[in-house]
Image: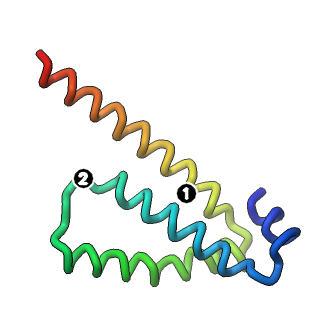
């Protein structure tokens, strides 16, 4: 779905669009999936490696036509629901 839209409208910038979309969605998934705060240097290292790994994911989306963007949206929705429920349970536990 996303692949066809990008190819039809922005063919010249396909890789760049997939890279940016995947990077944003992967950063959101990382922030939702890991509860611990890291020190600054470790956090910078993680984000650099995440940006490098996104190249591979963008290649899968552009060349192999895999639905990486759609999959990452679903992953972010599931993680968001999980974090919301976890927050509500902790809030209820503190009020008791």
Would you call the spot at circle 1 few (<14 residues within 10 Å), some (14-19), or many (20 or more)?
some
According to the image, label 1 marks what residue?
72
> Which numbered disc, 2 or 1, marks the residue that appears first in the sequence?
2
Please tell me which residue is depicted at 74% across the width and 81% down the height of the picture. Answer: 13
According to the image, label 2 marks what residue?
35
Q: Is residue 64 above or below residue 86?
A: below
Which image quarter: residue 21?
bottom right
Please tell me which residue is depicted at 73% across the width and 70% down the height of the picture. Answer: 65
User: Which residue, as the protein is rendered here, is positioned at the far top?
Assistant: 96
Image coordinates of residue 41 in percent, x first then y, are: 20, 80
State the separation of the CA atoms marked 2 and 1: 19 Å
Would you call the spot at circle 2 few (<14 residues within 10 Å), some (14-19), or many (20 or more)?
few
Residue 39 shown left or right of residue 89 in the figure: left
Viewer-closest of 50 and 20: 20
Image coordinates of residue 72 in percent, x first then y, are: 55, 57
Residue 20 shown left or right of residue 85 in the figure: right
The image's colouring method is rainbow
Which image quarter: residue 28?
bottom left
């Amino acid at each position: 779905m996303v692949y066809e839209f990008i190819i039809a409208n922005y063919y010249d910038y396909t890789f760049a669009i997939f890279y940016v979309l995947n990077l944003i969605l992967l950063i959101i998934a990382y922030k939702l999936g890991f509860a611990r705060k890291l020190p600054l240097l470790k956090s910078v290292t993680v984000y650099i490696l995440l940006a490098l790994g996104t190249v591979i994911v963008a290649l899968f989306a552009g060349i192999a036509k895999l639905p990486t963007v759609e999959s990452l949206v679903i992953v972010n929705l599931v993680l968001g629901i999980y974090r919301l429920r976890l927050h509500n349970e902790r809030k209820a536990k503190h009020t008791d």
